[in-house]
Amino acid sequence: MAYSEKVIDHYQNPKNVGTLDKSAKNVGTGLVGAPECGDVMRLQIEVDDATGMITDAKFKTFGCGSAIASSSLATEWLKGKSVDDALKIDNMDIVEELNLPPVKIHCSVLAEDAIKSAINDYRVKNGLEEIKFEESVVH
Amino acid sequence: MLKLPIYLDNNATTPMDPRVLEAMTPYFLEHFGNAASRNHPFGWEAEEAVDYAREQVAKLIGADPKEIIFTSGATEADNLGIKGVYEMYASKGNHIITATTEHKAVLDTCKHIEKIGGEVTYMQVNAEGLIDLKELEAAIKPTTILISLMYANNEIGVIQPIKEISAIARKNGVLLFTDGTQAVGKIPVDVNKDGIDLMAFTAHKMYGPKGVGALYVRRKNPRVKVTAQIDGGGHERGMRSGTLNVPGIVGFGKACEIAMLDMDEDTKRISKMRDYLETELLKLEEAYVNGSREHRLPHVANISFKHVEGEGLLMGFNKNIALSSGSACTSASLEPSYVLKALGLGDDLAHSSLRFGLGRFTTDEQIEYTIKAISETVLKLREMSPLWEMYKEGIDLSTIEWAAH
């Protein structure tokens, strides 16, 4: 199976690989996936409390090229967005941007789940209610 | 001079040896006859070429030429061997013993047999990939007609104790079929010394052409018969009808002849490269060889690089190095290799595996390049892996409740 140019580019030059201080109050961490499934994503956001804007985003991913590219792209999109806008990122936007084939759609679902999970972590840390999301159906 | 891309997937298929192609060419052109045409020189030439190839093939495995049934490949030979025995020996019983690490051509054939009323025992293997001989003997029942165990495994290269297995089969009056696809032409296989009754093998795993294989069927002590699965003109002593693939068979014969001549030298050279590759890659932290290292084909290595996903790893160099992974990230099921799982490997390690299949045309420079490329990619991806980070922090990954997805 051939990868799209964009997937290859993110794989070769991943954006925002790294770790934020997960104990910091303004950092939200999402860890999704499972080693048995062949992919685990950890996505972190750093939020400016005053403005509600995401000032930094980092990821680390265990997975195939598409999983790495999906998380790399997600961090790029997150930076500079408000937390509310970040919630609007849909996995199909990632699929479209990276030209993911059907068998790789689960990578984009994982990235969306990681974003939501990171936002919820941030919310809970800051005394806000956890948002309930509908279960993703595509795997 | 380093030649790119590097082909290290010789368990999937091998490139043709130019000497094989040279032998085949005339049988596409001037000697195009049908080996079954008895009335003119075109047919005679073709028949003669097939007879000669049959001798070359038989010689490689210590068989009589009359015991070789040409097929379209190993999958067909697996089907013919297993289904053919099941039908032919129906009055004796309906039970077959095989193992969970067999190739799909054997496993799916056995599943078919279960559907049509047969009974199949699937033996487990140990962590090394080997079956237990006591368990094998215990699995034999009065209705057992066939033991089907592969000579060497396609993913991990592990060689089963065929001589010991055949001794058990003989003692209990059960036939032994073996899928010899990965072993024949690579290591010495002798149907008499090994006590094999039926064996499937193919040309394209030993530098011959695709589309031609053989089923060895023993004619003496005991005389074995199989029921044909393809009916027609009664070719191959009625066991496999269909016009013979003369150029393919000629190539198969030549490939067998070369394999026999070059085996010692090839093995020496290739196993040295394999061992070097393995030693160097195992210098990486948390890298493990899958399957027995002792009972193993000389050209195969299956290694897991923990906390790095196999397909992601391949992507780091697959423009220049052709390899397989036990990760099945591309498959719809997302299930990693069933062979590695049968060894008791966790799914995480199975997802992290690479299979190296070296070959006759692999060079030292290519191995050097491969070691470097893989080591660099593993290190790079580990820097990107949350699992590696947790491992380095001393977190026990098995204690984490992973969000299933």
Image: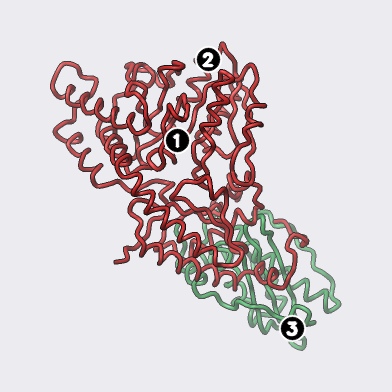
Chain colours: A green, B red
Same chain shared by disc 3 and disc 2: no
Q: Quadrant of the C terminus of chain B?
A: bottom right
Residue pictured at 69% horizontal, 59% vertical: A34
Q: Residue B185 location in percent, x, y?
A: 37, 40
For residue A28, what is the image quadrant?
bottom right
Q: Is residue A7 above or below residue B254?
A: below
Give the residue pinned by disc 2: B89
Where does residue A42 sit, x and y in percent of width and height?
68, 70
Q: Earlier in the sequence, mark 1 or mark 2?
A: 2
- Distance of mark 1 from mark 3, alpha carbons? 65 Å
Q: Is residue B363 above or below residue B37?
A: below
Which disc is residue B368 wearing? Answer: none
Observer-nearest of A130 and B6 = B6
- Callout 2 amino acid: Tyr
Of helix, strand and loop, which one carries label 2? Answer: loop
Residue at mark 1: chain: B
**Pointer 1: what residue?**
B180
Labels 1, 3: one chain: no
Residue beneath the point at 67% across and 84% down: A55
Q: Which residue is mark 3?
A: A52
